[in-house]
Image (tube, rainbow, N blue to C red):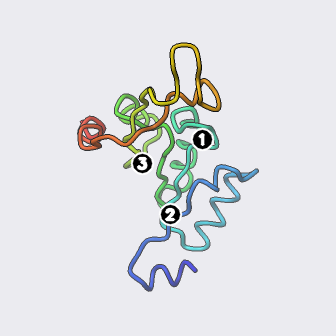
Amino acid sequence: MVGEIHDAGAKAVFHRAFDLTPDPFAAMETLVGLGVDRVLTSGQRAYAPEGADLIAELQCRFGDDVEILPGAGVNASNARGLVCETGVGQVHSSCRELVTDETTSGESVSLACHAVRQRRKAPRDYRRSVRHLRA
């Protein structure tokens, strides 16, 4: 499949399924051997900043062979530190912002499945978020 992707002039990117592998180093060796160009990872944690140690180790061991792309929970407030701490060249961010969804709760009743769900990632004008991320 990687060959077909390359034949189409595209890069082969492996998504965060990588974060579920029991041995990230063996998995990365396999992906490099398959010719994958980029691996999106949170460092096997819920959020990439929490997985920075593993991301840095992956970058150190495999960065010359595959692009390590940290993603999940990356935003303008932590992107620069993540890049500095891990040595990666770029990050992935949805540039979404948490907002309170006023349509799911009243004064004493919430229709949200769980109180945490009252805050959701909502579509916004992402240009501002991207400008802050690049700064």
Residue 131, by quadrant, is top left
Q: Amino acid at mark 1?
A: Leu
Q: Secondary structure at mark 1?
A: helix
Residue type, numbered disc 2: Asp
Q: Which residue is mark 1?
A: 54
Which residue position is annotated with label 3?
A: 92
Count of numbered marks: 3
Label 3 vs label 2: CA separation?
19 Å
Seen at 57% across and 32% down, the residue is: 50
Q: Quadrant of the N terminus?
A: bottom right
Q: Earlier in the sequence, mark 3 or mark 1?
A: 1
Residue highlighted by disc 2: 65
Q: Residue at x 64, y 56 (%)?
A: 17
Q: In this picture, is 59 found above or below 119?
A: below
Toward the viewer: 89 or 96?
96
Q: In the shown orientation, is residue 63 left or right of residue 57?
A: left
Q: Earlier in the sequence, mark 1 or mark 2?
A: 1
Residue ranking furthest to the right: 22
Give the alpha-carbon distance from disc 1 to disc 2, as whole Å: 17 Å
Please state the horizontal and vertical placement of residue 53, each as a whole percent of the image: 57, 36
For the residue pair 56 and 46, the one nearer the viewer reads as 46
Rate crowding at label 2 as few (under 14), some (14 to 19) or many (20 or more) other CA atoms within 10 Å.
some
Q: Secondary structure at mark 3?
A: loop
Give, as a three-letter code, the residue at label 3.
His
Q: Is residue 91 left or right of residue 120?
A: left
Tell me what residue is drawn at x 49 percent, y 53 percent: 68
Q: Using the image, tell me which numbered label, if any, was put on residue 42.
A: none
